[in-house]
Image: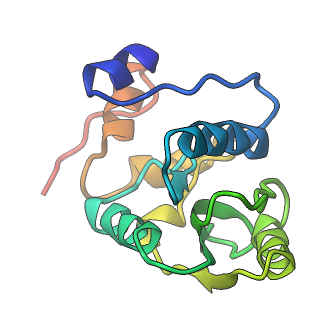
Amino acid sequence: MARLATRHDMAVVRERGAGQSAALRAGVAWALERGHTAVATIAADCAMLDIDDLLTLMEKAARRGRFLACAPDAEGKGTNAAAVRPLDVDVWRFGPNSLERHRAAAEAERLRFEVLDLPSLRIDCDRPEDLLGVISQPRPTATFHVLRQLGLAGRRAVG
């Protein structure tokens, strides 16, 4: 991933494998050191992300004010993406029921909280059966092609 990121002129922030919340804290510290005022994050297992939802998330991150905006998973309990401003707050609460925990963290930090309706970010791959949803999509995704290369998805007609 680091080589791919570097090829696309993206920074790589290394973390110690202490979980998603700790990784976000490391990324936020990096961004703060460089003068950034907001961050957006997307869980790596959101295989169906489309450009419109990505642009919406980035537009939310570019807003002024104090806020935490979260995109929930399909169950409406987890958080698959988020944007926050300012960066000197600790709102990262990934894990079980993270959407509610993020809401409580925003309230404690006196941030406006918003739930984002980003359909392509509802689908994550937490369990092996979640990959069936990716494989069955009408348009092949990059994840579908990787699964096919691994022999986990068959060829299918694309309309």
Residue at the spot x=18%, y=47% of the render? 157
Q: Quadrant of residue 59?
A: bottom left
How many numbered discs, if any?
A: 0
Given residues 135 and 43, the one toward you in this image is: 43
Q: Quadrant of residue 28?
A: top right
Query: Is residue 69 left or right of 110 when viewed as pictured?
Result: left
Q: Residue furthest left?
A: 159
Given residues 159 and 15, the one toward you in this image is: 15
Quadrant in which the N terminus is drawn: top left
Quadrant in which the C terminus is drawn: bottom left
Q: Give how far across and how far down residue 141 sits, in percent.
A: 30, 45
Whether residue 36 is visible to the viewer of this picture, yes or no, is: yes
Query: Is residue 111 left or right of 14 when viewed as pictured?
Result: right
Q: Residue furthest top?
A: 3
Above or below 82: residue 128: above
Describe the colour scheme in one phrase: rainbow
Q: Give how far across and how far down residue 119 sits, in percent.
A: 44, 73
Query: Is residue 54 left or right of 126 when viewed as pictured?
Result: left
Whether residue 44 is visible to the viewer of this picture, yes or no, is: no
Residue at the spot x=72%, y=43% of the render? 25
Residue at the spot x=78%, y=37% of the render? 19
Q: Give how far across and how far down residue 42 sits, in percent.
A: 53, 52
